[in-house]
Image (cartoon, grey):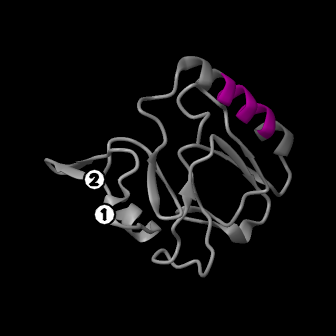
Amino acid sequence: MHKKGKEYEVKEPFTDYGRYTYADYLEWQLEEMVELIHGKVFRSAAAAPRRIHQKISGKVFAKIFNFLEGKSCEVYEAPFDVRLPIKSTRNEDVDTVVQPDICVICDKCKLDELGCIGPPDLIVEILSPGNNKK
């Protein structure tokens, strides 16, 4: 990670500097979305998603939202942090945080002001040429 003015320029991944946690992630002021996977940083996308990606995401989100209306589950769309703890839920211990395109959470105990802690009940990832390898 290279400092550029007040912001950081991200190269994928920038693990030369060590492993990172969600506490580190919360400190960064990045222009682009990134995800942490086992402490390594990956860019979510080089640029804004293409129009077709957004159209598909919007349609799927709307269908799920309408289906869940009046039910206890909630649907969220990116950017929305999903933290996957192993040892503890402390930000300093969580080293994996992803932002699925769409996720459904039925257990309200998993929700906090930062997003979701633990695996959602359903995730939807819309593949595009830039994200289908990860």
Viewer-proximal residue, 113 or 48?
48
- Point out the residue furthest to the left here: 5
Three-letter code, disc 2: Met
Viewer-proximal residue, 85 or 58?
85
Q: Quadrant of the C terminus?
A: top right
**Where in the figure is residue 81, as x and y percent of width and height?**
55, 55
Magenta part, dominant SS? helix
Q: CA distance from mark 1 to mark 2?
A: 8 Å
Q: Secondary structure at mark 1?
A: helix
Q: Secondary structure at mark 2?
A: loop
| Residue in view at x 53 percent, y 29 percent | 130
Which residue has dot 1 on it?
A: 17
Three-letter code, disc 1: Tyr
Q: Quadrant of residue 9?
A: top left
Q: Residues within 10 Å of mark 1 (few under 14, many from 20)?
A: few
- Point out the residue furthest to the front here: 16
| Residue in view at x 67 percent, y 38 percent | 125
Which residue has dot 2 on it?
A: 1
State if disc 2 and disc 1 touch (CB < 8 Å): yes
**Where in the figure is residue 4, as x and y percent of width and height?**
16, 46
| Residue in view at x 73 percent, y 66 percent | 108
Residue 5 lies left or right of residue 8; in this view the side is left
- Point out the residue furthest to the top here: 52
| Residue in view at x 80 percent, y 60 percent | 106
Q: Which residues are magenta?
A: 56-64
Residue 12 lies left or right of residue 100; in this view the side is left
Camera-nearest label, 1 or 2: 1
The answer to if 58 sits in the magenta stretch is yes
**Where in the figure is residue 128, as x and y percent of width and height?**
60, 27
